[in-house]
Image: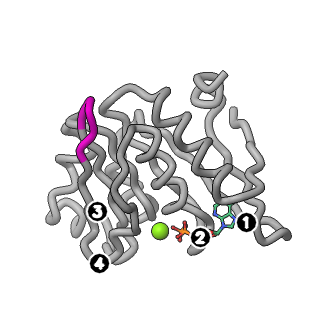
Amino acid sequence: MNNTFLSKSETETEKLAGLIAKALPNGSVVALHGDLGAGKTVFSRGFARGLGITEPITSPTFTILQEYNFSAGRLYHLDLYRIDGPDAALAFGVDEFLYGHKGHTLIEWPERITQILPESTFHIRLERSEIETVREIVMPSALASLLK
Ligand SMILES: Nc1ncnc2c1ncn2[C@@H]1O[C@H](COP(=O)(O)OP(=O)(O)O)[C@@H](O)[C@H]1O
Ligand SMILES: [Mg+2]
């Protein structure tokens, strides 16, 4: 079962992501689904802020991976837009971030590697609405319940 949250601004999306970051155990893998401009990177920024990371957060579209340190561990931010599929991702060494449990892993364009995502992956979907600044954020109820 899923829960849907309405975000009315970039800031609201960041806040929700920050709460999720604080609620998740270290070593969690979070798949961020949604089209270009849906807010995956905005969500990632809020997630990082929730962990206490203050560095600028941008989509690692060209570098694929960006690592950040925070007091209690590490955040790995992956953008797989330019990755063709699981083989290319594995050649890049993605299994270390999916299965290494060395820190939180956030994945933009997780559809590229559906076949090799851990079963424990938290899937979150961001969707645009008719209103330019409103997003629907859909997550499993189990995750939503951690926020209450
Ligand atoms: N409620 C909202 N939540 C997140 N982003 C929003 C929202 N409303 C407008 N935006 C804008 O949508 C864009 C999302 O961009 P980005 O996070 O880079 O998307 P993606 O990484 O999914 O391609 C940003 O320009 C942001 O300011
Ligand atoms: Mg992005």
For the residues labelled 4 and 1, the Cα–Cα distance comes to 24 Å
Q: Which residue is denoted by mark 4 in the rendering? A: 62
Please tell me whether the stretch drawn in magenta is mainly helix, strand or loop. Answer: strand
Asked if disc 2 is less than 8 Å from ligand 1, the answer is yes
Find residue 128 and name its label: 1
Residues packed near mark 3 inside 10 Å, few (<14), some (14 to 19) or many (20 plus): some
Q: Residue at x 38, y 26 (%)?
A: 25
Q: Nearer the viewer, residue 107 or 52?
A: 52
Q: Are marks 1 and 2 in contact (CB under 8 Å)?
A: yes
Q: Which residue is denoted by mark 3 in the rendering? A: 86
Query: SS class of the residue under badge 1?
Result: strand
Find residue 35 and name its label: 2
**7 on left or right of 36:** right
Please, what is the three-letter code of the amino acid marked with disc 1?
Answer: Arg
Can residue 72 be found in the magenta stretch? yes
Query: SS class of the residue under badge 3?
Result: helix
- Please tell me which of labels 1 and 2 falls first in the chain: 2
Please, what is the three-letter code of the amino acid marked with disc 2?
Answer: Asp
For the residues labelled 3 and 4, the Cα–Cα distance comes to 17 Å
Q: Quadrant of residue 146?
A: top right
Q: Which residues are magenta?
A: 69-73
- Please tell me which of labels 4 and 1 falls first in the chain: 4
